[in-house]
């Protein structure tokens, strides 16, 4: 925005600089003026003291006292020519010449000049008031006389044998005053002395001004660096925008400054990570998952996204370097909640798998109907009956799942059958254990298929990666009636080489464990693929319902492999026949 005159307004840092320079200049000028005035006053007092000392010396001279008394006793004042060549004139001029005073004046008791540097003014009354000195009191003065401005002193002259005689007091009042001595030093000489002393004053002021200017420039640069060159109005607008954006988005935002401290921790980040506001804490000491801290390491790839489990949420996190021009401002970590998306994705995968399997079964069922219709059309009724008996023995649908007839719930039939098709394609036999008994009906197919599908997928992966010649996965299901809904118990075993976790089976539920690629425990969560999150998610989902997912047997190399058990309360209900 331009000013009314069409010129760009000065930046805040420039205004601050000019204001500081003005203040520094004003302070320097005031300090110099005060120092010069104090110096002038000091020199003036020194001149007054010097004049007072000289006046006392002249006034206490016995010859001066005697001559002044002698003149005072005469009727009238001697003519100027006589005074000019008299002893008082010689004493006064000698003192003035020796000391460099502007004047040394001697008067009688009426204030008439008896000695004066200007002989033409002898016999005249002094231009300044002599009454204080003629009253017996010493005074110092600063005034302008016939010879110009001066700083001086007036001292009474006492008659011989009376008064103090030394003139060191401020006035005794006990002697007879016969005249006074007035001594003055030109203030022009004081100014000359001040001019000699002013050089250090000017140099000091110039040095102070230079230091102030340098400090102002350094302060301006620091201000620009701290504000990133922004104006106060822009900073205020940014603060409002930051609050509006950070608190108005569902994504978690964590800002880490260049010195490694958390500068921003918005409400969404607090909710997703289950932490209070951590602003001000060191990032490396903050109670957040290690995967987040790994995103900001020097060797981390900028923009890489990782999935992790925090509390009951599946989060996708990414980090980017924050730069302003070439200045490093730190890191910004973004957190997005993908819990529902993960559930929907797994459900969609299950539905897709089931639909593919059902399409294949529909085609097979159509072929079976055509076969029966063929037998009937050629009159082979017994062959048709035998064929139907064989179909009835294998269940309503023919999936590559051993003992599939033990499953009566349609959700479990379709889902496990679809998983059997997938397993068969990978050379793994999926079978139902003989202890399977599900009398109720599944009421929460999404949760059941999420947990069951993850356990089956992990078991199939382990069987494929195992060293056993026969690859199989065995599944047993049992439901238990309850007041708040039945509980489904699931046990999954495989022919793999067991869990490579040493003596800690619980490690498989840590973020990063995956059975893909042989069940190795990865060092970190794989980016983008969701690998290493299934077991952790399955356990959290089961625990959220009041159940759990545990390891019954870690398994052995060469088989049998690991055995998992899942307990899912409130997922079944009594069947209504």
Image (spheres, helix red, strand yellow):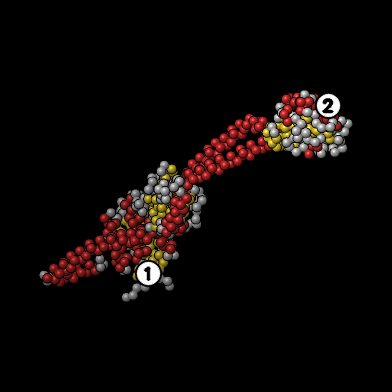
Q: How many marks?
A: 2
For image coordinates 11% across by 70% down, the residue present is 378
Q: Can residue 166 be spotted in the picture?
A: no
Q: Nearer the viewer, mark 1 or mark 2?
A: 2
Please determine whether, in this image, residue 132 is positioned above or below residue 86. Answer: below
Identify the residue under disc 1.
572
Q: Give residue 9's position: percent from left, percent from top.
A: 44, 47
For image coordinates 59% across by 34% down, the residue present is 202
Please determine whether, in this image, residue 435 is positioned above or below residue 424. Answer: below
Q: Can residue 202 be spotted in the picture?
A: yes
In screen coordinates, is 487 left or right of 202? Answer: left
Q: Does the CB distance between marks 1 and 2 fall below 8 Å?
A: no
Identify the residue under disc 2.
63
Please determine whether, in this image, residue 85 is positioned above or below residue 111. Answer: above
Categorize mark 2 by other alpha carbons within 10 Å: few (<14), some (14-19), many (20+). some
Which residue in the rendered view is the most extreme toward the bottom? 577
Categorize mark 1 by other alpha carbons within 10 Å: few (<14), some (14-19), many (20+). many
- Residue nearer the viewer, 150 or 530: 150
């Amino acid at each position: 925005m331009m000013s009314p005159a069409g010129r760009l307004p000065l930046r805040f840092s420039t205004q601050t600089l000019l204001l500081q320079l003005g203040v520094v200049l004003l302070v320097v000028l005031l300090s110099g003026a005060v120092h010069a005035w104090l110096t002038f006053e000091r020199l003036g007092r020194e001149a007054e003291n010097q004049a007072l000392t000289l006046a006392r010396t002249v006034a206490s001279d016995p010859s001066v006292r005697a001559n002044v008394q002698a003149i005072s006793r005469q009727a009238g004042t001697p003519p100027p020519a006589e005074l000019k060549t008299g002893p008082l004139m010689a004493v006064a001029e000698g003192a003035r010449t020796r000391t460099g005073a502007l004047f040394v004046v001697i008067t009688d008791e009426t204030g008439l000049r008896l000695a004066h540097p200007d002989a033409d003014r002898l016999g005249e009354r002094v231009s300044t008031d002599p009454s204080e000195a003629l009253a017996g009191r010493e005074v110092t003065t600063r005034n302008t006389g016939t010879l110009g401005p001066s700083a001086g002193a007036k001292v009474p002259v006492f008659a011989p044998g009376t008064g103090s005689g030394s003139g060191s007091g401020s006035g005794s009042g006990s002697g007879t005053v016969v005249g006074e001595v007035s001594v003055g030093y030109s203030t022009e000489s004081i100014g000359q002395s001040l001019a000699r002393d002013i050089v250090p004053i000017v140099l000091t002021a110039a040095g102070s001004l230079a230091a102030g200017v340098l400090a102002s420039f350094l302060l301006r640069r620091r201000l620009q660096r701290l504000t990133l060159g922004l104006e106060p109005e822009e900073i205020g607008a940014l603060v409002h925008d930051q609050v509006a954006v950070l608190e108005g988005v569902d994504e978690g935002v964590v800002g880490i400054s260049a010195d490694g401290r958390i500068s921003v921790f918005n409400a969404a980040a607090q909710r997703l990570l289950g932490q209070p506001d951590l602003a001000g804490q060191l990032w490396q000491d903050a109670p957040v998952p290690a995967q987040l801290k790994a995103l900001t390491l020097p060797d981390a790839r900028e923009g890489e996204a990782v999935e992790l489990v925090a509390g009951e949420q599946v989060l996708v996190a990414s980090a980017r370097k924050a730069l302003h021009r070439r200045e490093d401002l730190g890191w910004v970590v973004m957190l997005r909640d993908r819990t529902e998306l993960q559930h929907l994705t797994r459900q969609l995968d299950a539905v897709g798998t089931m639909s593919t399997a059902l399409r294949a079964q529909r085609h097979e069922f159509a072929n079976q109907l055509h076969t029966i219709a063929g037998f009937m059309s050629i009159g082979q009724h017994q062959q048709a009956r035998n064929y139907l008996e064989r179909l009835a023995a294998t269940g309503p649908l023919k999936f590559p799942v051993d003992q599939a007839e033990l499953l009566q719930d349609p959700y479990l039939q379709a889902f496990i059958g679809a998983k059997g098709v997938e397993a068969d394609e990978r050379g793994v036999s999926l079978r139902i254990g003989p202890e399977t008994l599900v009398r109720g009906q599944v009421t929460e197919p999404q949760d059941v298929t999420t947990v069951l599908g993850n356990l089956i997928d992990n078991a199939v992966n382990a069987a494929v990666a195992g060293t056993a010649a026969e690859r199989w996965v065995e599944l047993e299901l049992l439901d238990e009636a309850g007041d708040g809904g039945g509980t489904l118990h699931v046990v999954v075993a495989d022919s793999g080489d067991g869990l490579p976790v040493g003596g800690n089976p619980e490690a498989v539920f840590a973020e990063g464990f995956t059975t893909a690629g042989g069940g190795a425990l990865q060092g970190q969560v794989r980016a983008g693929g969701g690998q290493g999150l299934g077991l952790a998610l399955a356990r959290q989902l089961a625990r959220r319902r009041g159940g759990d997912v545990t390891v019954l047997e870690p398994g052995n190399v060469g088989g049998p492999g690991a055995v998992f058990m899942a307990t899912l309360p409130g997922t079944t209900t009594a069947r209504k026949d």
